[in-house]
Image (spheres, grey):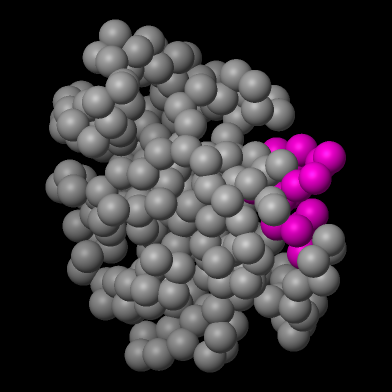
Amino acid sequence: MLTLYSYPTLFGVADNNGYGLKVFAFLKLAGVPFHHEHIFDASKAPRSQLPYIVDGDDVVGDSETILQFVTQRYALTIDAALTPLQRTQNLLTTRMLDDLYWVMSYSRWKDERYWHAFRDALLREHPTVTEEGLVKAKAFNEQRYYYQGIGRFDPDAAMARGLADLSAIAALIPADDGFVHGEAPTSIDAGIYGFIANIYYYDIDTPLKRFVAGHDNIVRHCRAIHAMVS
């Protein structure tokens, strides 16, 4: 059976990282049986990044590569009806979610307004995690942010970037019912859920959470996918 390796749970979602939760939701929505292993140490993962999967002799990392691999191996039809334009929209949305990821991560590890609450939540929910280990992870992430670019923003400017991303998501999701491309969810709905759930269910009051909570269509979409995959 396929095994998904990703970060642990937090605040009731299956992975506290958007990429791992995206893969988790995709596998659930597509009906692929899998075993889920939660780990903190990514040193043995492909490119030292989570999530990754092991399926027989194949080890596959990177969330988009995982989705492509699983779709081909199991002949999945979750995206089969998409038009070329919809597939292009999915690509653009996926790249935007990559941008949102850095803001979300920055808000947890670098923004001193929220870092302590995030640290305390991890220590409370995962007793094997140490404060010393989290301080090291914080320093590592701050270095990543600098070279990626978001670390050169002040906290309010970083948040503004994330709010712009969320505004685009709000425009994509139907106001009343359904999913991005119709009545049934597709892979892009799993991708959006991976990040939005890690904002909406995040029990810390950030501008990102306030934005999501203030948009009924985003909340409806998140709760609908959450019910399908939980």
What is the residue that sits farthest to the front in this orientation?
Answer: 1
Identity of the residue drawn at 47% across and 48% down: 18
39 w.r.t. 26: above or below: above
Identity of the residue drawn at 46% across and 56% down: 194
Report x, y in % for residue 150: 45, 30
Foreground residue among 215 and 119: 119
Foreground residue among 40 and 95: 40
Identity of the residue drawn at 74% across and 85% down: 81
Foreground residue among 114 and 193: 193
Relative side of 142 to 108, left or right: right
Report x, y in % for residue 212: 28, 63
Looking at the image, can residue 33 be seen? Answer: yes
Look at the image and say whether residue 58 sits in the magenta stretch.
yes
Report x, y in % for residue 6: 52, 40
Looking at the image, can residue 100 be seen? Answer: no
Relative side of 133 to 2, left or right: left
166 w.r.t. 224: above or below: above
Identity of the residue drawn at 67% across and 43% down: 53
How many discs mark residues in the rendered view?
A: 0
Q: In which quarter of the image is residue 115?
A: top left
Report x, y in % for residue 97: 52, 52
Look at the image and say whether residue 223 sits in the magenta stretch.
no
Chain part drawn in magenta:
55-71
Quadrant into which the C terminus falls: bottom left
